[in-house]
Amino acid sequence: MSNRNQPPAVIQSTAVNLLRDYYPGLTAESLAAALSQHGTTSAVTVQKKLTRSECARLLGVSINSVNRYIRGGRLKAVNISPRLVRIDPESVRNLLDNGVPEDEVIVPQCHGKGGDR
């Protein structure tokens, strides 16, 4: 059931997770059906710049990861002041569509007893 006009699966699942509190029975399939009935399958256009916590919530990562993506150039950010940062929503969409390269994924190492499991 792959349609070229359907949003990528990661965007659908993120949308379902964000909307689940408001629509408890929502599934990725019902969202796709609703979008196709509405006549649009494009992702919702975000007009405003995002905070680091909003970006982290959308990406499903920590704020430290968002900071790392900004330093690494994966996310475009505007420093309004030393502690006030806003992130370009287009760069978030690009990261959602393309993902993070495997060599940038941090895998925690287990320390202590039985650490070599």
Image (cartoon, rainbow, N blue to C red):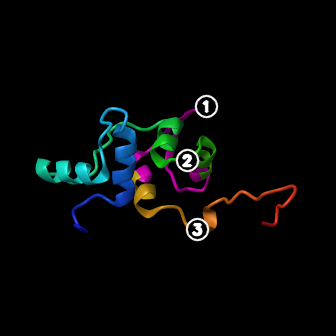
Spatial CA distance of label 2 from label 3 is 15 Å
Q: What residue sits 53% from the left and 38% below the top?
A: 52
Q: Is residue 103 left or right of residue 54?
A: right
Residue 33 position in % (x across, y down): 19, 52
- Kind of residue at disc 1: Arg
Q: Earlier in the sequence, mark 2 or mark 3?
A: 2
Residue to which mark 2 is pinned: 61
Report how far apart the C-alphas of labels 3 and 1 lie in the structure: 30 Å
The picture places residue 88, in percent across and down from the top left corner, at 43, 45
Side (left or right) of 18 relative to 32? right
Q: Which mark is residue 83?
A: 1
Is disc 3 placed on a helix, strand or loop?
helix
Residue 76 versus residue 22: which sits nearer the camera?
A: 22
Q: Which residues are magenta?
A: 69-92
> Could you say which quadrant of the image residue 103 lies in?
bottom right
Q: Residue at x 62, y 50 (%)?
A: 68
Asked if labels 3 and 2 touch by Cβ distance under 8 angstroms, the answer is no
Q: Amino acid at mark 2?
A: Val
Determine whether, in the image, residue 52 is placed left or right of residue 21. Answer: right
Residue 71 belongs to the span the image colors magenta: yes
21 in magenta: no
Which residue is pictured at 55% across the width and 47% down the height? 61
Crowdedness of circle 1 by 10 Å Cα count: few (<14), some, many (20+)?
A: few
C-beta proximity under 8 Å, tags 2 and 1: no
Q: Is residue 23 above or below residue 29?
A: above
